[in-house]
Image: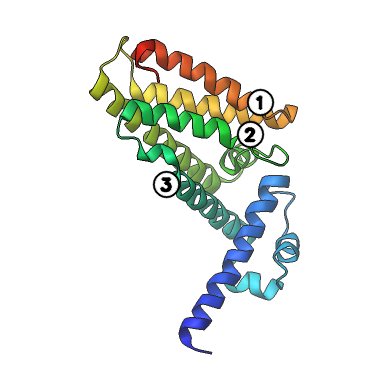
Amino acid sequence: MSKTAVKEQSSETKRKLLDAAMGLMIRQGFTATTVDHICAEAKLTKGSFFHYFKSKDEAGLEALEHYCARQQAMFARAEFNKSSDPLERLYEFLDFIAQAGCGPGQVQGCLIGNLTQELANTHPQFRACCAEKLNGFAGHIQTMLREAGAKHGTKAAFDPESVATLFVSLMQGSLLLAKARQDKSVLAENVAHFRAYLDTLFGKSKRR
């Protein structure tokens, strides 16, 4: 087998382990997920697991990075990126978030939010990583708000950083409530409330 083929096989093995860890931790949490569970889900041996990870904690942190990379790739491919108008792009981004929460299957929430709820007080590395990811998401929204305000002006003064934090809080809270109720409509309804709030900031006539 060539070096390239060995490298590709190795990469695929690690991806299977990360996919398994990510899926299990979304469904049942970090504490309830064992190395044995991850190996069984990936259909790989514990030897394979410990070839790539020193511990479940290390695998969990990499699974979190893996999850965020997949989310970022999904956002990068989304249609809202094609809009040249920053305010239209912002509204289309909200549409995308609302629709993503109504996909098939059981309501499982967001891995970042789930791990924050479960581990923030006991696992400092996970807390710091989750905080970084949530802050990064808020920063992306903040940029869109600033760009929309710069192009269109605003009807009411507001702090983009604060409004971006509000949306992340609304989104994570909505996912938590949707998970508790097993009701996928929660996120879409709350995103609609946030859109109405944006209308008051930018002026309803600006809304598409």
Local crowd at mark 1 within 10 Å, few (<14), some, or many (≥20)?
A: some
Q: Residue furthest front?
A: 208
- The residue lying at 60 percent from left, 40 percent from top is 110
Looking at the image, residue 203 sits to the left or right of residue 133; the answer is left
In the rendered image, the quadrant that contains the C terminus is top left
Looking at the image, residue 148 sits to the left or right of residue 99; the answer is left
Give SS at disc 2: loop
86 or 110, nearer to the observer? 86
16 or 85, nearer to the observer? 85
The disc, 1 or 2, on the residue closer to the chain's N-terminal end is 2
Question: What's the distance in space between the residues labelled 1 and 2, CA to CA?
Answer: 7 Å
Q: Amino acid at mark 1?
A: Ser
Local crowd at mark 2 within 10 Å, few (<14), some, or many (≥20)?
A: some
Q: Amino acid at mark 2?
A: Cys
The residue wearing badge 3 is 76
- The residue lying at 32 percent from left, 30 percent from top is 86
Q: Amino acid at mark 3?
A: Ala
Q: Does residue 105 lie above or below 58 as drawn?
A: above
Q: Is residue 186 visible?
A: yes
Q: Residue furthest bottom?
A: 1
The x and y percentages for residue 201 are 36, 13
